[in-house]
Image: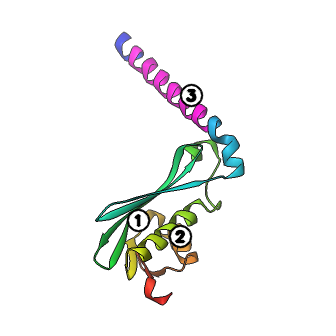
Amino acid sequence: MLINLFCQILDIYNKIRNKYYQTRRFLSILPHLKKMDVKLNTKCYPDFFCVSAELSNEEICRAVVIVSGECARLAHLFIEDDFMLFNVSLKNRGVGTKVLNEVIQLAKKRGCKNISGEMEQSSINKLTRFYGKSGFKITGDRFRYDLRDE
């Protein structure tokens, strides 16, 4: 009985401590979030490249693209979830679009003819709008951007 109570108290303590550190992290970037001075970073390797967006030296968005011949596959596009905990959203601020535009430019420089990928069923409605606005063609849960059209 006493051990169970101790475990419950320890669990509550850990949750509070995690929220504290998330809050400190959020407060440290709040001034930058208001201005949205986002910095893009790229790392290129022979078979893939990464594009990340940073705000106050914190990574907030990342894309990983696998290159195979003339095809680029967007394997991962991720926006940091910690900000959602505080009802401060990075959505509709252009961060994901900036990263996606950089992905398109890097794929062109690599000589790729298209960029493709798949969407998770749970996010398909939001992602269809997101990729559609950037010129991707959507078919079911797949998206494709033809670089030869440009």
Residue occupying the point 44% across, 83% down: 147
Extreme residue toward the bottom, this view: 149
User: Can see residue 8?
Assistant: yes
In this picture, is 90 found above or below 85? below
Quarter holding residue 122: bottom left
The three-letter code of the residue at mark 1 reads Glu
Q: Main secondary structure of the magenta part?
A: helix
Spatial distance from mark 3 to mark 1, Cα to Cα? Answer: 31 Å
- Residue 93, percent from left and from top: 65, 60
In this picture, is 118 found above or below 86? below
Q: Say few, some or many: other residues with alpha carbon within 10 Å of mark 1 (under 14 / 14 to 19 / 20 or more).
A: few
The three-letter code of the residue at mark 2 reads Asn
Circle 2 is placed at which residue position?
101
Residue extent of the magenta highlight: 6-26
Q: Say few, some or many: other residues with alpha carbon within 10 Å of mark 2 (under 14 / 14 to 19 / 20 or more).
A: some
Circle 1 is placed at which residue position?
120
Q: For the residue labelled by badge 1, is the local secondary structure a helix, a strand or a loop? A: loop
Circle 3 is placed at which residue position?
20
Labels 3, 2: front one: 2
Labels 3, 1: front one: 3
The three-letter code of the residue at mark 3 reads Tyr
Residue occupying the point 55% across, 70% down: 130
- Residue 109, percent from left and from top: 42, 74
